[in-house]
Image: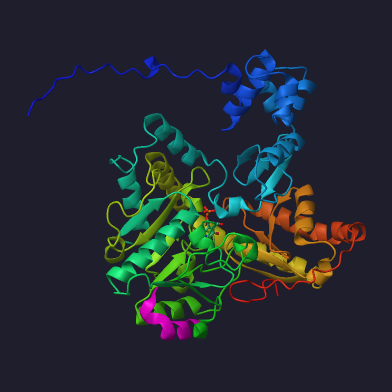
Amino acid sequence: MVIVKVKPIPFHFHSIPLRTPTPQAALLPHTNGAKLGGAAARAQSGGGRGCTMAGLARRGGAALARALERRGMCSAAAAAAALTSEELMRMERERSAHNYHPIPVVFSKGEGSHILDPEGNKYIDFLSAYSAVNQGHCHPEVLRALTEQAERLTLSSRAFYNDKFPIFAEYLTSMFGYEMMLPMNTGAEGVETALKLARKWGYEKKKIPKNEALIVSCCGCFHGRTLGVISMSCDNDATRGFGPLVPGHLKVDFGDIDGLEKIFKEHGDRICGFLFEPIQGEAGVIIPPDGYLKAVRDLCSRHNILMIADEIQTGIARTGKMLACDWENIRPDVVILGKALGAGVVPVSAVLADKDIMLCIKPGEHGSTFGGNPLASAVAVASLKVVTDEGLVERAAKLGQEFRDQLQKVQQRFPQIIREVRGRGLLNAVDLSNEALSPASAYDICIKLKERGVLAKPTHDTIIRLAPPLSISPEELAEASKAFSDVLEHDLPQMQKQIKKTEPAAEKQVCDRCGRDLYG
Ligand SMILES: Cc1ncc(COP(=O)(O)O)c(C=O)c1O
C-alpha cells in the first residue's frame, strides 16, 4: 500500500473566499432576504437584466418595488425592514402558493406567549404553531443551544457520526422509556417512518404475505400531508385531486373499540399497525371515551398488531402529561414525536420503538439527509430539558383546568352559542353552534379575537382550538377568556348584521373514503 503524504492546508475560517452578498442582501432579514435583496439591488443600481423599477415590478417584485418607490429609493434593507403587514401579506399572496388561508396578522417577533407584528401591535398566541411552541417563542435556553451548536457544526449527514446525535438519542429514549429512536425532521416524515417500520415489521416478524400488509387508522385523523399520509385522511380537501392514493389502509371510527375489534378479527392476520392520535387535534380536540386507549392496547397485543401513537401534537407536555397516552398509563409499541421536540426553533421529529421493531429497518432502507443533524439534536435536548426544568407538564395540567373553568363560565353566559368546551391540559377547544353563529363562522370569531389581541385559528367551520405556549401566565389566560366573552357579546351581533346571508351549501360534506358526515 502506498501512503501519499499530503501537506495539511492550514484552516482559517475567515480565509475561505465566500460569495459576498450584496450589502442589501446581507442586511435583509429572513431566508428570502438574499433573493429580495438581489432584485432590489438590481432595481437600485439599474444594472443586470433590464433592472429598472418598472422591470422589477413587471417580474413580480411589485410589492417591494412599490415599497422602495414610496420610500424614495432608500436602501432595500431599510425598505424591507419597514414593510407594513399589508405589504408583506400582499407580497406573500403574489409570490407563494395559496395552500393556507391565514388569519391576517404578520408575526415579526415572538417571546414566550407573545407576538409582535411589524407595526408593534402585541398579541397572545393561542395556536403555538399547532403546538410546536410548547416551550414559548424563542426560549433563551433553546436559542443558546442553537447558537452554540451553529457555530460548531450544523450538519454531518448520517453518512458519518456526529457528537450531538447520540446524546439526543440517549436522552430521548431514556426520557420516554424506549430502546431506540429514529430521527426525522417534520411530523409527516415521522408518520411515514412509523408506517414503513410497521410494514417492515409485519413482513419480517409477523410473516404477513408479501405486499399484503394493512394499516388501520381512524376517521377524522390528521397525520400530515405527504401522499402516504393523506391516503388515510378523511378530509376531502386533502385528498381530492391527488389520487391515486396509497393502498393498504382500513378505516375505523375514532373511539369505537367494537368497530376496531371487528376489523382486527376479520383482517388481523394482515394488519401490521393501528395508527391513532390519543386526542384528535385537527379534528377539533376530540377526546376518546375513558378506557379507549387501554382497550386498544389490549386488542393490539391480542392480535399481534403494533399500536402506533401519533403524539406529534399531543406529546411533550401539551395535554398535562408528557404523552397523552399517559392519561391511561399505556405504552404504545411505537410513538411518533415532532413539533415541540424542536421547540418551534428547528424541525425535529422522531419515532420511538424497542429493538425488536426498530431493527427491522436496515442500513439504506430509510433515512433523511437532515434527520439527526447536530443542530437539531442540540436543540431537541435543550427543548426537552426546558420541559422538565420548568415543570411544563404540571403547568399545562393546572393552567388548562383553570382555563376550561373560565371558558365554561363564558359558556354559561352564551349557552346557545357555545355547544361545548373540552380539552386536556392546554389543548382545548370551544365548539360553537353553526346555527347560532350564522351567517358568521368560527373564522370570523377568530378575526375578532385577533382584533382584541388573541390569536387563534378555527379547525373546521365551528371549532376554535385554544392551545397557547405552556409558559403562558394565568393573567393572559384570563385575558383571552374575557376577549372570547367580549367577542360573543359585542362583535358577533354586529357581524351577524353585516355579513350577507348565503344559501347553505347544498352538498352534504361526506368523506369520500368512509362516507362519514364530516362536520355533522
Ligand atoms: C397529529 C399530527 N400528526 C402529524 C402532523 C404533521 O406534522 P408536520 O406538519 O410537521 O408534518 C401534525 C401536524 O399538525 C399533527 O397534528
Front one among 133 and 100:
100
| Left/right of residue 78 with respect to residue 440 in the rendered view | left
Residue 159 location in percent, x, y?
Answer: 29, 42
Front one among 249 and 450:
249
Q: What stretch is highlighted in magenta?
A: 260-273
Q: Which residue is drawn at 70% across and 75% down?
A: 520
Picture quadrant where residue 505 is located: bottom right
Picture quadrant where residue 378 is located: top left
Q: Residue at x 90, y 57 (%)?
A: 494
Q: Which residue is drawn at 70% across and 29% down?
A: 61
Name above or below for residue 232 compared with residue 81.
below
Name above or below for residue 375 compared with residue 246.
above
Q: Residue at x 48, y 65 (%)?
A: 246
| Left/right of residue 241 with respect to residue 217 in the rendered view | right
In which quadrant will I find the N terminus?
Answer: top left
Extreme right residue here?
Answer: 497
Asked if residue 264 lies in the magenta stretch, the reply is yes
Residue 459 location in percent, x, y?
Answer: 67, 61
Name above or below for residue 186 compared with residue 408.
above
- Residue 330 shows up from this direction: no
Q: Looking at the image, what colour scheme do you see?
A: rainbow
Asked if residue 133 lies in the magenta stretch, the reply is no
Residue 243 location in percent, x, y?
Answer: 56, 62
Front one among 284 and 177:
284
